[in-house]
């Protein structure tokens, strides 16, 4: 067993760390650790404390709803106190207080705080003073000395200074007075309870001895301090003055009733005695001490009996008591009278004025006249240019100051330029307002003539040969424009205004145009227009210029002289349009009619599918490196606004009326039939008709403008005849050759609206050509140009109506008429009545419509029921149509010259026209009917 | 998905050459053997009874340049027509409907077949026997559509519901409700797991077939959505609306806006068909537009009258367009030439469907006089007018592989089969 031995030896050599545990005593059980629930904490009084809640205080902390002890309110059992009787003699209030009350903020803090002696409070001064007084006035000097020894000798610096100045305690501060201040003395006959007071020699002596030239210190009175009332006492209530009631009048002045001299002398501690005496006094009219008040000494003074007179006697002159026994401070009533008047403190160095200031002077308002009315009324303004000179004269004479009057009155009637002149300002460099000034005299005369002619023409349309010597039609038309311009044309001088600034060439042309207009040339734009331009372009531009000139007339030029052009213009006149437009439907229409599907009816576009779409379709992107989606778009010029502006012309209304009428007549027979391929040729005929009619209308309109109303008459009289073209052709001039085509914007307006093309601006010339070819049929030379669309909006509508595709329209239109919110082909009705064998195509149709159906199918068109109110008109219309049927058949038969045009939708125009017509218009037409038949 | 999942035999059935497959060959073969020019005249003559008498010569009469062109067109059209005429008839390996078969070049390959025609082909049968009558009880049935294999059908009701049927048995399988207004069209996905529908509530809904829940709703159309189609893989839904746009909705991602908006139409889009790389839309503006994704081109064919329904032929070579002038037109897809015109029915007001028969032998169209009209595709002659009901026959759907026809009139859907059809043939569906 070598190893254990070795270990033993090693063990002794080992160094130990830490303290070894005590060896367990024999037989003693190992202390169990106190379980958690039994571990307790006790406070300093041996009470159990629990870690309980958030509150450290409170009676019930630790013991729920108890007084903080385990036993709660349980009465303590009797414990013999015999052993500890000597120790515990008296139970103080502290014995019944909680320790919280003794803490710093408790009721009775036990900690060291500054006592009153050392605190600098006014009450301390009073005490101090009292102490001093007591020490001084003590009969035995030694006592005071003793008192001084004992009492903390504390005299404030103020008191010390006063003393050095000769002040003595008990005296008032101020100059000395002659009269003896203190007269009051306790009467010897006063019954004194208790032991009789020994006569105090010193006081008596003082009383008796009154030397002549002895001045006395003033009474120690508190100055009346009329402070604003801040308390809640009753009015006039004052607590007794503590100084007087207590110590201020001490020293025999106010004999303390309840303190006797023996006591005073015997008691070494005068202040103590005094305080005791105070206690004996009658307590003030107090109601106790408030909880918040520190001491009752200050607030509720003790009132002593000495303040009151107990005996009626002669009034003393200085006393001014006059038998009153009121407190002293109210004695000097007269003296205080003045002071009372002044409310507030009197500052040092000031005194109340003896004399009252003079009363304020008040001024009486003036007397009003009797007939005064408190309303202002204005005199009537008599302007200088009043036509009553007499009145004016009278006014001038009466007032004598007419000049100013008129000036003032004119102030509001002056215009800007007049004011400018008055102010002496220089004129704006705006242009001259009227283009008329630039016109030559001859032109002016011609304009005058034209105006007259127009008026006359308006008045009497029946007189055809109005003897107007306007020779050439285009001249006349153009001249009419100028006439319409009147005196309002803009002038080229307004160089700030550049309506076509973006197109410098155009702008130049515009300026030239204006210039030439100024110079009185008639065919202005022709000379300046771009030679490369086609005729219709020229016409359009001319119209644009014209409108621009009218738009920006004088007022605008005045404005334009004030405004400057923006440097940056947004590209508003560019619009994104698909690069490739679906071609016009007209030729397609014809191709469809001819069943020539294929190239003619097919449009092929480059179309960019979205990449994701290709991915989803598992198709390679055909344009993998282009970001375009859909149809490629290009920026194109939008149409100029001027295209669509119309001029207010006096003759337009009548013209449009007549044209409406004619269109009405001409189109009526071409009622929409159910489109079928059998009537292709028929339709083409109609198309032809409609176009030529349209053209002729345009022409005739122009004719009217040329003061040749006979063509209209002719047309009217010849409605049986195939067309008014004859009349039109008669008046065809060579000059019209140049304007063979109808105005382009006319077509634009038509096609833009009818086929809902996104932009009509991209019509190429070729397109135009394609359109032109079908219409260049026999009547084409009669095509009258550009002056069409400027007539009136009614005409434009007309035009739009004329050139819709019929096939597309007829059923569709019916649909739309039936129910406006429906688009495209409808869905069949939900249920049909079981009885109707025949299919009812329009389930929504009303009974009216049904009745219409019953009518013989003379007119093949099927008018679906529109809204009810339109229905009536329609009927009327139909009426008329029947009458004209015969004529138009004739016309048709004559007019089937060619068959390759696309047809226009007569049906649509027809119906739209109906909707546009007012009932009066219808009536009017009906009246005209018989005349036309002749 | 599970519900409609194709039975194992389902796919086979579609492709199984049937005895009647070669039927159309018979009338065609002599014609093909003949010269193309002579054929032209014959075709015109045959069309005589139903068509306007020879409009082309009269048009070409003036001898204008256009007339000459017309003549050329005529020639090519006839060539073209011949190509398409016989192609669907050659059942020999029936090309998957969407495969693009070259037109004239096929003549060479077809030639031998022509030379040795199949013995005794049967005449194509038309569905004239009413086998099922489904009272849908969902208001007016706006559309009836076969699913991809023809075993089931969908009916779109005006009471906002969409119903799934087995038309062979006449059983209602499921009702899908969730549209806010009447349902106007529906389609099933290629795997029968999803449905799409559209309605007058301007939305396009994607449905889960089995659960009947709306998977997604696509909002964006500004008006009623007239027609809806899945693409081949059901990854894109295409919808055409009266707001004149076709919108392509992505089913794969969660993007709420369409992939692309085809807004070339100037008026409402009434009908829409999708092939594997094409989108065919018919619009009320009278045009049939074909968006070719592969070529990146848009072909717009002017019809002239508001188009109510368009469809591809099964061989993908032709498009059929029905318009409100009571005419169906068969157009060559590539050139836009007119291959045939079919009239006799009445369609002037309503949006009615048209379709081609399962082998492109016949053209069928609804009519407003309560009948369904069948025309021979080649001859253009009216072969059958099937009286369906008193009201307008609004919708029809042809079985993808068999002579079966679904017609919807008023609140009723009827299922028609050929005369020789027997119930035993019915596959045990469902």
Image: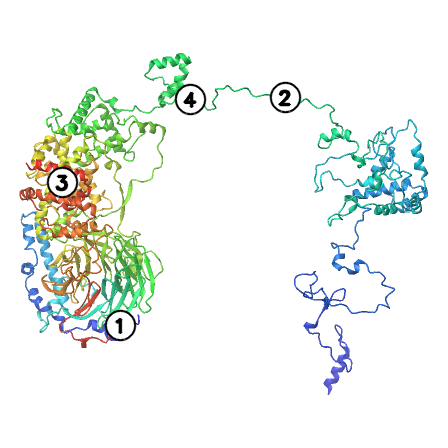
Query: Against A115, is A477 above or below?
Result: above
Q: How many angstroms separate mark 2 from mark 3 (CA)?
A: 98 Å
* Whole-percent x, y for residue B170 in the image: 23, 71
Q: Is residue B75 visible?
A: yes
* Whole-percent x, y for residue A1 in the image: 73, 88
Q: Which one is nearer the viewer's eye here, A833 or A4? A: A833
Q: Secondary structure at mark 4?
A: loop
* Whole-percent x, y for residue A206 in the image: 92, 34
Which residue is under mark 3? A664
Chain letter for mark 2, please. A
Q: Which mark is residue A378?
A: 4
Q: Are marks 1 and 2 in contact (CB under 8 Å)?
A: no
Residues packed near mark 2 inside 10 Å, few (<14), some (14 to 19) or many (20 plus): few
* Whole-percent x, y for residue A871 in the image: 18, 46
- Whichever of labels 4 and 3 marks the residue nearer the N terminus, that label is 4
Q: Quadrant of residue A802?
A: top left
Chain letter for mark 1, please. B
Query: Against B82, is A880 above or below?
Result: above
Chain letter for mark 3, please. A
**Numbered disc in front, either 1 or 4:** 4
Q: Is residue A222 visible?
A: no
Q: Are marks 1 and 4 in contact (CB under 8 Å)?
A: no
Q: Secondary structure at mark 3?
A: helix
Which residue is under mark 2? A361
Asked if badge 2 and badge 3 are on a common chain, one would say yes
Q: How many angstroms separate mark 3 from mark 1 (CA)?
A: 64 Å
**Numbered disc in front, either 1 or 2:** 2
Q: How many angstroms separate mark 4 from mark 3 (CA)?
A: 63 Å
Q: Secondary structure at mark 1?
A: loop
Q: Which mark is residue A786?
A: none
């Amino acid at each position: 067993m070598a190893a254990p031995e070795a270990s033993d030896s090693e063990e002794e050599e080992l160094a130990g760390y830490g303290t070894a545990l005590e060896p367990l005593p024999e037989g003693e059980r190992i202390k169990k650790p106190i379980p958690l629930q039994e571990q307790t904490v006790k406070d300093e009084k041996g009470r159990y404390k629990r870690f309980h809640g958030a509150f450290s205080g409170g009676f019930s902390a630790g013991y729920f709803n108890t007084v903080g002890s385990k036993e709660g309110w349980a009465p303590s059992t009797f414990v013999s106190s015999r052993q500890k009787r000597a120790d515990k003699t008296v139970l103080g209030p502290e014995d019944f207080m909680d320790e919280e009350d003794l803490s710093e903020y408790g009721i009775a803090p036990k900690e060291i705080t500054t006592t009153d002696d050392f605190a600098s409070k006014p009450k301390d001064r009073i005490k101090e003073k009292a102490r001093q007084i007591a020490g001084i006035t003590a009969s035995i000097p030694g006592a005071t000395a003793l008192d001084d020894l004992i009492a903390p000798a504390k005299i404030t610096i103020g008191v010390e200074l006063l003393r050095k100045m000769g002040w003595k305690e008990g005296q008032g501060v101020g100059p000395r007075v002659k009269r003896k201040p203190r007269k009051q003395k306790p009467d010897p006959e006063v019954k004194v309870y208790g032991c009789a007071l020994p006569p105090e020699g010193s006081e008596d002596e003082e009383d008796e001895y009154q030397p002549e030239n002895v001045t006395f210190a003033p009474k120690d009175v508190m100055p009346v301090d009329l402070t604003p009332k801040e308390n809640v006492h009753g009015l006039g209530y004052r607590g007794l003055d503590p100084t007087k009631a207590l110590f201020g009048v001490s020293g025999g002045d106010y004999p303390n009733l309840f303190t006797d001299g023996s006591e005073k002398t015997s008691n070494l501690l005068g202040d103590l005695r005094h305080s005791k005496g105070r206690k004996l006094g009658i307590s003030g009219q107090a109601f106790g001490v408030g909880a918040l008040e520190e001491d009752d000494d200050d607030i509720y003074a003790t009132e002593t009996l000495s303040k009151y007179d107990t005996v009626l006697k002669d009034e003393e002159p200085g006393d001014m008591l006059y038998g009153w026994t009121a407190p002293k401070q109210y004695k000097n009533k007269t003296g205080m009278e003045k002071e009372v008047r002044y409310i507030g403190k009197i500052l040092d160095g000031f005194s109340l004025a003896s004399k009252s200031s003079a009363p304020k002077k008040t001024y009486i308002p003036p007397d009003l006249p009797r007939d005064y009315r408190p309303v202002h009324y204005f005199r009537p303004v008599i302007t200088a240019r009043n036509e009553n000179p007499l009145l004016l004269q009278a006014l001038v004479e009466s007032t004598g100051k007419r000049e100013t009057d008129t000036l003032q009155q004119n102030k509001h009637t002056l215009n800007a330029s007049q004011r400018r002149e008055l102010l002496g300002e220089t004129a704006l460099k705006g242009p001259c307002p009227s283009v008329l000034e630039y016109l030559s005299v001859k032109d002016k005369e011609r304009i005058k003539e034209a105006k007259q002619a127009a008026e006359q023409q308006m008045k009497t349309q029946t007189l055809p040969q109005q003897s107007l010597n306007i020779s050439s039609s285009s001249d006349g038309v153009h001249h009419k424009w100028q006439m319409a311009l009147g005196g309002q044309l803009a002038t080229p001088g307004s160089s700030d205004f550049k309506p076509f600034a973006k197109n410098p060439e155009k702008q130049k042309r515009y300026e030239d145009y204006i210039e030439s207009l100024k110079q009185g040339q008639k065919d202005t734009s022709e000379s300046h227009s771009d030679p490369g331009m086609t005729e219709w372009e020229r016409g359009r531009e001319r119209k644009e210029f014209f409108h621009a000139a009218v738009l920006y007339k004088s007022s605008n030029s005045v404005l334009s002289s004030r405004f400057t052009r923006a440097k940056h213009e947004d590209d508003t006149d560019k619009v994104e349009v698909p690069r490739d437009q679906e071609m016009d439907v007209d030729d397609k229409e014809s191709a469809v009619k001819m069943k020539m599907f294929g190239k003619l009816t097919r449009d092929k576009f480059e179309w960019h599918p979205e990449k994701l779409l290709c991915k989803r379709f598992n198709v390679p992107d055909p344009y993998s490196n282009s970001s375009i989606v859909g149809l490629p778009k290009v920026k194109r010029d939008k149409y100029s606004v001027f295209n669509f502006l119309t001029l207010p012309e006096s003759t337009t209304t009548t013209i449009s009326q007549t044209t409406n009428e004619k269109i009405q007549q001409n189109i009526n027979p071409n009622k929409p039939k159910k489109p079928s391929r059998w009537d292709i040729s028929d339709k083409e005929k109609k198309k032809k008709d409609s176009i030529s009619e349209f053209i002729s209308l345009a022409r005739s309109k122009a004719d009217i403008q040329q003061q040749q109303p006979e063509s209209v008459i002719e047309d009217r009289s010849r409605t049986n005849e195939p067309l008014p073209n004859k009349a039109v052709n008669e008046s065809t001039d060579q000059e019209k050759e140049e304007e063979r085509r109808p105005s382009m914007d006319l077509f634009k307006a038509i096609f833009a609206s009818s086929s809902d093309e996104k932009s009509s601006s991209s019509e190429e010339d070729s397109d135009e050509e394609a359109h032109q070819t079908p219409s260049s049929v026999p009547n084409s030379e009669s095509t009258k140009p550009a002056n069409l669309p400027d007539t009136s909006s009614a005409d434009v509508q007309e035009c739009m109506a004329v050139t819709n595709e019929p096939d597309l329209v007829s059923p569709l239109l019916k649909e739309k008429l039936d129910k406006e919110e429906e688009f495209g082909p409808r869905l069949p009705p939900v249920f049909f009545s079981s009885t109707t064998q025949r299919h009812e195509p329009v389930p929504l149709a009303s009974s009216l419509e049904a009745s219409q159906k019953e009518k013989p199918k003379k007119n093949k068109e099927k008018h679906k029921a529109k809204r009810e109110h339109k229905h009536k008109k329609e009927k009327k219309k139909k009426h008329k149509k029947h009458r004209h049927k015969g004529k138009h058949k004739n016309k048709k038969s004559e007019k089937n010259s060619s068959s390759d045009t696309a047809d226009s939708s007569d049906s649509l125009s027809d119906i739209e026209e109906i909707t546009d017509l007012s009932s009066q218009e219808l009536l009017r037409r009906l009246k005209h009917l018989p005349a036309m038949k002749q | 998905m599970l519900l409609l999942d194709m039975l194992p035999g389902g796919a086979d059935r579609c492709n199984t050459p049937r005895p009647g497959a070669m039927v159309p060959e018979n009338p065609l073969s002599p014609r093909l053997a003949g010269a193309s020019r002579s054929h032209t005249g014959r075709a015109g003559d045959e069309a005589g009874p139903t068509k306007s008498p020879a409009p082309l010569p009269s048009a070409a009469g003036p001898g204008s340049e256009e007339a000459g062109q017309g003549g050329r067109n005529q020639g090519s059209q006839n060539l073209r027509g011949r190509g398409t005429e016989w192609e669907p008839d050659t059942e020999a390996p029936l090309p998957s409907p969407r495969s693009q078969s070259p037109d004239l070049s096929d003549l060479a390959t077809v030639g031998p077949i022509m030379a040795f025609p199949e013995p005794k082909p049967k005449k194509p049968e038309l569905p004239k026997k009413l086998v099922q009558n489904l009272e849908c009880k969902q208001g007016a049935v706006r559309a009836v559509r076969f699913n991809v294999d023809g075993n089931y059908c969908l009916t779109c009701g005006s009471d906002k519901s969409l119903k799934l049927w087995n038309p062979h048995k006449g059983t209602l399988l499921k009702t899908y409700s969730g549209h806010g207004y009447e349902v106007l069209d529906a389609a099933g996905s290629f795997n029968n797991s999803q449905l799409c529908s559209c309605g007058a509530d301007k939305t396009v809904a994607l449905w889960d077939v089995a659960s009947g829940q709306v998977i997604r709703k696509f909002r964006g159309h500004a008006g009623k959505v007239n027609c809806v189609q899945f693409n081949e893989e059901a990854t894109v839904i295409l919808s055409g609306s009266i707001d004149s746009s076709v919108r392509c909705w992505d089913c794969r991602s969660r993007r709420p806006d369409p992939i692309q908006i085809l807004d070339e139409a100037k008026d409402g889009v009434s009908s829409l068909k999708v092939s594997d790389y094409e989108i065919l839309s018919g619009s009320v503006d009278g045009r049939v537009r074909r968006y070719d994704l592969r070529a990146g081109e848009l072909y717009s064919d002017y019809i002239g009258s508001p188009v109510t329904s368009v469809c591809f032929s099964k061989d993908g070579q032709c498009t059929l367009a029905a318009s409100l002038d009571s005419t169906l037109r068969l157009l060559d897809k590539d050139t836009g030439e007119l291959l045939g015109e079919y009239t006799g029915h009445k369609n002037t007001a309503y949006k009615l469907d048209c379709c081609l028969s399962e082998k492109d032998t016949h053209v069928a169209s609804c009519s407003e006089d309560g009948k369904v009209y069948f025309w021979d595709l080649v001859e253009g002659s009216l072969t059958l007018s099937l009286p369906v009901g008193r009201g307008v026959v609004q919708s029809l759907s042809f079985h993808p592989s068999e002579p079966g026809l679904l017609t919807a009139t008023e609140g009723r859907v009827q299922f028609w089969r050929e005369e020789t059809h027997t119930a035993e043939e019915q596959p045990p569906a469902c």
